[in-house]
Image (cartoon, rainbow, N blue to C red):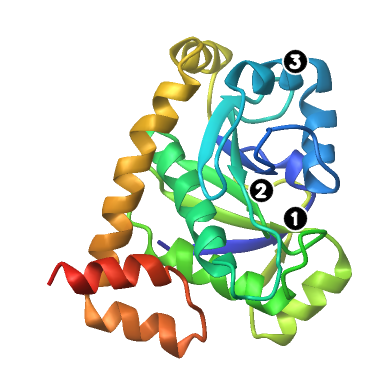
Amino acid sequence: MNFDVVQNDITNMIVDAIVLPANEKLKEGSGTSRAIFEKAGRKALTKACHEIGTCKIGDAVPTLAFKLNANYIIHTVVPKWIDGEHQEYDYLSAAYLSALNVADIMGCETIAFPLLSSGNNGFDLGLAYDIAKSSIESFEGVTLKKVILVIYGDNIATFMKGKGVTVVNLQHALKIDKTKEERKLKAKQLGENSKQVAAKIFEEQITKALDYLKDEKNREKVVQAGIAIAQLAIKLATKKK
């Protein structure tokens, strides 16, 4: 799936789903996490996360977006960089794929990601972008039509442009024509079913990853990009031939 890179504050994005880089306890973190909690409404979002409980690294769960210009927040648990030998690549790719699957299953058409793990989690900026790019492009959705990677700040924008990436600088991007009634209906449909949605995601996520990596050409693309995106999944796919 193709995606656009937009320079903006992700909390300003008017999309179906906004992705929050989460920790396993789904508690408010720093940086992008803090900004989303604050803009969405800290009390309501904290309560929603508490009701879900926990989420494993590489997985994702949805909540309502509350005061944001979105229907949902998708909390995807991202890895911290250690040394490259602790499945950091795999977990980061899984975080993208999990969030995309959650959005797709819930009928979202547009989704906005920050550049996951590129801040306090310590991933090299170039590596974080390469994993984001390869992961998003490998995804084939049913309802999703638009994926946006939102970067914040001039320094990151300059870095991206240096890599030959087209960066669109917008105050607001990709407005969606959703009435208040439609938003309320979506909210009601989500209700208290966040855990059930997440459970449905897991099996589909693994299946899609294995199917993608069964193709030798796709595995070559990963290698050529210098990314070990799902080393474990590659091994499983090879065994199943």
Q: Quadrant of the N terminus?
A: bottom left
- Mark 1 and mark 2 in contact (Cβ < 8 Å)? yes
* Residue drawn at x 51%, y 12% as measured from the top left: 192
- CA gap between label 2 and label 3 equals 26 Å
- 76 w.r.t. 95: above or below: above
Q: Quadrant of the C terminus?
A: bottom left
Amino acid on which the number 3 mark rests in the picture: Ala
Please tell me how crowded label 3 is: few (under 14), some (14-19), or many (20+) other residues with Cα within 10 Å: some
Name the mark on residue 25.
none
Q: Secondary structure at mark 1?
A: loop
* Amino acid type, residue under disc 2 in the picture: Ala
In this orientation, which residue lies closer to the viewer: 79 or 205?
A: 79
Query: In the rendered image, which residue does mark 2 sit on?
Result: 173
Q: Position of residue 225 (x, y in %)?
A: 49, 85
> Where 61 sits versus 42, above or below?
below
- Numbered label attached to residue 44: 3
Q: Residue furthest bottom?
A: 224
Give the mark toward the camera: 2 or 3.
3
Measured along the vertical axis of the image, is residue 33 above or below residue 62? below
Give the SS element for disc 2.
loop
Query: Disc 1 residue type?
Result: Leu
**Along the polypeptide, which appears first: circle 2 or circle 3?**
3
Q: Earlier in the sequence, mark 3 or mark 1?
A: 3
Q: Position of residue 72 (x, y in %)?
A: 58, 29
* Identity of the residue drawn at 54% across and 59% down: 91
For image coordinates 72% across by 28% down, the residue present is: 68
The residue singled out by tag 1 in the image is 170
Which numbered mark, 3 or 1, is in the foreground of this view? 3
Query: Along the line of sight, which residue is nearer the eye, 150 or 226?
Result: 226
